[in-house]
Image (tube, grey):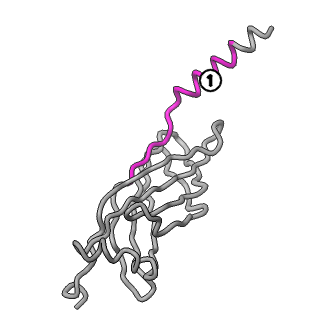
Amino acid sequence: MSHFVDKAKNYVAEKVANMKKPEANLTDVDLTNVSREGIECLAKVTVDNPYGHPIPICEISYILKSATRVIATGAIPDPGSLKANGQTVLDVAVKVPHSVMVSLVRDIAVDWDIDYELEVSLVIDIPLFGNFTIPLSNKGEIKLPSIKDLF
């Protein structure tokens, strides 16, 4: 009897391991706003859902780093659902306060940009699997506006 149960477990584990899962890409990070409170960046996450029904997104969390220092963290609870059999583009707004920007003066002074690494975790609820986390990471630079750009 235990031999039969082991075979059943192996069969189910093999089928689950071979099931398609949603895939995501961090496609773009742009500076969207400079204000007295700080700067705001917008990251675009593109998610492909292979299933014929929408999948709820539990949470999107992010960590923005510059020169290995964490400069912003946050989470967006319950941001909606992934479209069935299609692609969904999610906007992740990242706010960096001016108090943190002061610590980046050396990096900014050299080339008037912020070298960054953005880590995003997308937690979705897949039936039978439960919560499934898709980790994403992107490195790049955010060009800051010059005085000419502001006027």
Extreme residue toward the bottom, this view = 151
Please give the name of the residue rendered at 56% of the width and 64% of the height, measured from the top-left corner. 75
The answer to which image quadrant residue 103 occupies is: bottom left
Instruction: Tell me if residue 63 comes above or below residue 99 in the rendering.
Output: above
Horizontal side, residue 32 vs residue 100: left or right: left
Nearer-the-camera pick, 48 or 73: 73
Q: Estimate the x, y position of residue 77 in percent, counting from the top left.
A: 60, 63
Extreme residue toward the front, this view = 106
The residue carrying pointer 1 sits among few (fewer than 14), some (14 to 19) or many (20 or more) residues within 10 Å by Cα, namely few
Write down the residue under mark 1: 13
Tell whether position 22 is magenta. yes
Q: Estimate the x, y position of residue 10 in percent, counting from the top left.
A: 64, 17
Horizontal side, residue 107 vs residue 76: left or right: left
Instruction: Tell me if residue 77 comes above or below residue 87 in the rendering.
Output: below
Horizontal side, residue 81 vs residue 113: left or right: right
Q: Estimate the x, y position of residue 87 in percent, counting from the top left.
A: 42, 49
Q: Secondary structure at mark 1?
A: helix
Please give the name of the residue rendered at 65% of the width and 36% of the height, measured from the top-left corner. 128
Tell whether position 12 is magenta. yes
Nearer-the-camera pick, 11 or 84: 11
Please give the name of the residue rendered at 56% of the width and 59% of the height, measured from the top-left corner. 80
